[in-house]
Amino acid sequence: MTMNWLPIPSDFRGDLRAALETLDLPHRLEKLAALAQHRLGFLETIQLDRTLGRLAVGPASGFSQVRLAILASSTVDHLAPAIRVAGLRRRLLIDVYVGAYGQYRQELADSTSPLCRFAPQVALLSLTPREAIASVPVTASATEADATISRTIEDLRGVWRNAREALKATLIQQTFLDVSEPLFGSHDRLVPGFRLQYIEGGKCAGRHSFQPCWAAAAAEAGIIHSPDFDGAFAESIGFECDPSLRAIGVAIET
C-alpha cells in the first residue's frame, strides 16, 4: 500500500547513512523518527527497522515505549517491521513479540511461556476465518451454520478471558476478514454454509452471519467494536486516523 499522504524522501539512503553516522544516540533516534515521517516502500521499511534495531534504546525523551504481542493463527512475522516503523512515526518505540505459529492458546495457558515472560502491555489477536469455518460444508443448513457460529463465539469469549487473566494487558481483537473467491457469484449470500456469507454476513440480512454476532459478543464483554475504523473512532482513543485503516474493524478493550 502506498501512503500517498506522506512526503517522498529526497534521499533515503543518504539520510539513513547520516543517521547511522550520528554518534549521539538520542540524535540518531530523532533522525530515524524524522525519516519515518516519509513515504516508505517495503525495502525502505525493512532497512529503517533494522537500523532502529541496532540501537540499544532505553527510555528516550519524547518517546513512549510499548510492548506489543501479536497472537495469530497465520504468519505475521512480516508485519513486525512495519509496526515498529509506524510506531516510530508516532514517537512510539514498540517492542514486538510474535507468537509461535498458531500456538496462542498454548502460550496463554502456560505461565512460563515466552509470551507471559514478555509481559506485553498490549496483545493483538489476529485470527483467520478458517478456524471457524473449516468444518462448515457448503451444504450446511441455516441451523447448522447458526450452531457453528454459537460454538465459535463461545470459544472466542474463552480466548478473551484467558488472555485477560494471563497477560493483564489491553486486548485488541482484529476483525475477521475473508478474502475467499466467490463460488456461486451473487448467489453466495443465499447459501448459509458458504464462507463469504458466513463471515461477512453483516452486509446482508441473514441469521447465519458471523460478523454481527462476534461484534455483539465483544460489546457484552466490555470491548468496543468498530466495523469502520474512521477518524472519529481513532480520535476517541487518542490516535490520528490513517486512511489505510478505514476498512479495518477492530475491537479494543476498555
Image (cartoon, grey):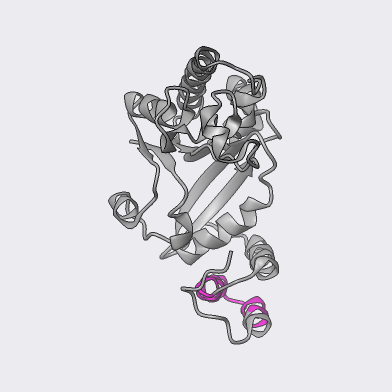
Q: Is residue 2 visible?
A: yes
Q: Which residue is found at the position 55% from the left and 74% from the top?
A: 39
Above/below status of 25 relative to 145: below
For the residue pair 179 and 101, the one nearer the viewer reads as 179
Q: How many discs mark residues in the rendered view?
A: 0
Quadrant in which residue 217 is drawn? top left
Above/below status of 58 relative to 195: below
- Give how far across and how far down residue 58 sits, in percent: 53, 57
Quadrant in which residue 170 is drawn? top left
Please say whether residue 19 is one of the residues in the magenta stretch.
yes
Q: Identify the magenta region.
A: 16-38
What secondary structure predominates along the stretch shown in magenta? helix
Above/below status of 21 relative to 252: below
- Give how far across and how far down residue 150 sits, in percent: 48, 16
For the residue pair 38 and 120, the one nearer the viewer reads as 38
Q: Is residue 112 visible?
A: no
- Give how far across and how far down residue 220 sits, in percent: 33, 23
Please say whether residue 147 is one of the residues in the magenta stretch.
no
Q: Is residue 192 left or right of residue 107?
A: left
Q: Which residue is found at the position 57% from the left and 71% from the top?
A: 25
Query: Which quadrant: the N terminus?
Result: bottom right
Query: Which quadrant: the C terminus?
Result: top left
